[in-house]
Amino acid sequence: MEKICVAVRVRPPICHENSSSTFWRVDDNQISLHKLHGSPISGVSYTFDHVFDENCSNSDIYELLTKDIIHAAVDGFNGTAFAYGQTSSGKTFTMNGSSNDPGIIHRAVNDIFQKINMISDREFLIRVSYMEIYNEEINDLFAVENQKLQIHENLERGIFVAGLREEIVNNAEQVMKLLESGEVNRHFGETNMNAQSSRSHTIFRVVIESKGKDTGSFGDYSSSDAIRVSVLNLVDLAGSERIAKTGTGGVRLKEGKYINKSLMVLGNVINKLSDSAKRRAHIPYRDSKLTRILQPALGGNAKTSIICTVAPEEIHIEETKGTLLFASRAKRVTNCAQVNEVLTDAALLKRQKLEIEELRWKLQGSHAEVLEQEILKLRNDMLKYELEREKLEMELEKERRSHKERDQYIRDQLMMIENLSSLVSDGDGSSSQGSMKESPIEECHNRGDDFKTPCFKTAPKAFVAKRSNYSQLPDFSSLPDSFSDVADEDTWFKINKGYIADLDSLQTTPARKVQSFPPEDVTPNYLNKKYKKELQNLKRRLELVTEEKNELQRKLAEDIEVKDKLKGDISKLKQEALLAREMPQRLCDSVTSFKDTYEEVLSKMQVKMHYVSLIQLFISNLYQNINLLVAILSKQRYTFDGKSSTAKLLRCISEIGSILFSTMETSISNTTDRHKLSSGNDSLIQEYNKMLSEKLKSTITSLILSETASSEDKQTKTSCSCYFEVVASSRYHVSILVLFFVMILGYFVPFFRTLIF
Ligand code: ADP
Ligand code: MG
């Protein structure tokens, strides 16, 4: 149990009065009223936790009064700080501050984010909402369309305002922007006391959810991973001015009444709470929306501080005394604050845990701000869907209830018709009897006993029987909602299940009966006619009601259609959200696959670069050797001695070929060693190499043999011109060359194919 922390702040005087005879003096944590010359006025001295004089700043107030509450809220305690006082005493200045001296709200928001950034072992989810209570109606300051919101209470969420927009935020700047936009929607009015007096109570609410980071890995839940949920209310109350003083009228007067009413209830609640626990009776939290919302902060599970602002001017002396009285009562109120740990799905953090973890996991290692924004947007979307669903559920419930009522009404009407029909048929029967018997009414009348007790037995028997039957029906008519002394016709109808009592038939006093109706009219025929007429009337009404019912049913069908459509839209939106949520994963996948492909391409490129250099080497070798060959050929042409020149030449080519292939082999083996090419490709190339080398060698050997043989033959022959021998020999050379190049080409084609594929 701890007491509410109460402080008083005296604002600087706005105008200096010349004729004042008293002044408020502040000493440490005491405020007292003194006469102008210094002597204190007895009985007007109060002590509080803190008393701030006119020189104090918002920063002092925050440090001494609110900071602890804000820090406790981050640790899981509910917290409330509110400013109470008359108009123009400085409540809004304390809560909102100025550009030079930011108020409590601004400082609290900054502090919350600073603190949670310092806590590394817990993760936080912060939601904010901003509402005003204007003329006892709750309006959403973040969404102007959300008006006249209702307060609900359940075990999971405690007391909450249904349909109030909450925004998930992750930095102080974001909150400030939201507050600015909300401030525009606030109700202000001009009174004599303050040019821009706030005419509503505003509640800025921060919900802080947090969870230890070490409980389980991603996607692994256990029932023990409790989530701390704390609610922080920062309240700027409207002024408790006296109507005469503010000079209000019309709309302002109405506002003033509501403001005074809710502040009066707040005072009552504080009064009751400040009584000793034994004498505490019923606490009237439900008498105003303000006290209902602040219920946990007043004598409940919250750490609370109240800053009571007072004006020092002598004209405000009564209001100041009132405020100080309120403050001293509030000082006696005790609260019982404890850390709120939630194990159910009520904690948004728990519901969103999977998604947050998933997204955070995706964000690991990359500082993609775009993705962070995306996460925030998705979280807010989810919150909106939930609120939308809540609203739709409420509407549906309302619709169901009204439908039930309509059905009940129609059933009642049908029963009335049924009753009347049976009455009429009974009436017909009695009329036939009436011709033989004297009418019971007449019977009574004819006795001439004008002062006897009412003759109740004259009521139709059928009616009595029917009534007893009705009493057995399960849906026996309920009492009408509003039942005053005088029942109107409809109410009477409802009570009697359609039976319209003919008061005269009860014959309360014969004298009255005689006076009201001539005796000849009171016959069964007359009654019959009357009933028939009533039956007709009722039938007409039934038709109307049936029409109305049909119309309502049609409307209901339309409503259901609209609702189905809305549900469809919501599921579509959910799907879109799901898709959007998958986006970061897809992006990550694409980036990873792109990276893999890139690496693969890079490695291939490197290998290919080696091949290219290899080919270059090969070509340069080839070029050199061709040059050598051409030089040898040209030399042979001029130093031709007609004897085994071709053999020499071919030997030369054979040597060149073997040099060429050995170079190739060395280069390829170097490349494969360095880059670890796949063994399949190596062996293929090596095989080609060997095969070609052998082929070339065998061809060249066979050519050498044939050439040697032909030269030996030529020597045995008689004469032959040198010129023709040179030409023949040159043809051989050319053919060998062509053969050589074809083989080289034959090597190149598969070699290139291996490179490319
Ligand atoms: P309330 O919200 O109680 O009606 P305001 O906060 O609007 O009153 O204050 C009325 C005026 O007094 C404003 O112009 C405000 O700037 C000024 N004021 C109030 N308190 C202080 C203070 N402590 N220091 C300086 N100016 C103040
Ligand atoms: Mg104000």
Image (tube, rainbow, N blue to C red):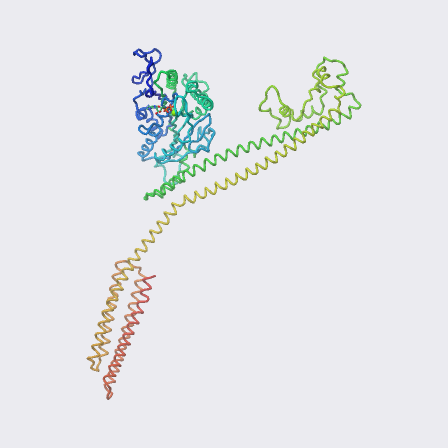
Q: At 43% from the left edge and 43% from the top edge, which residue is drawn? A: 578
Residue 641: percent from the left, percent from the top? 20, 82
Which residue ends up furthest to the bottom in the rendered image? Answer: 718
Residue 89: percent from the left, percent from the top? 36, 21
Closer-to-camera residue (563/175): 175
Task: Name the side, left or right, on which 37 lies relative to 220.
Answer: left
Task: Name the side, left or right, on which 521 lies relative to 72.
Answer: right
Q: At 58% from the left edge and 32% from the top edge, which residue is drawn? A: 404
Task: Name the side, left or right, on which 608 lies relative to 493.
Answer: left
Above or below for 9 versus 753: above
Is residue 299 among the parts visible in the rendering? Answer: no
Q: Ligand 1 shows up in which quadrant of the image?
A: top left
Number of numbered labels in the structure image: 0
Task: Name the side, left or right, on which 497 lies relative to 576.
Answer: right
Location of residue 490 (image quadrant): top right
Location of residue 232 (image quadrant): top left
Closer-to-camera residue (212/396): 396
Residue 499: percent from the left, percent from the top? 67, 25
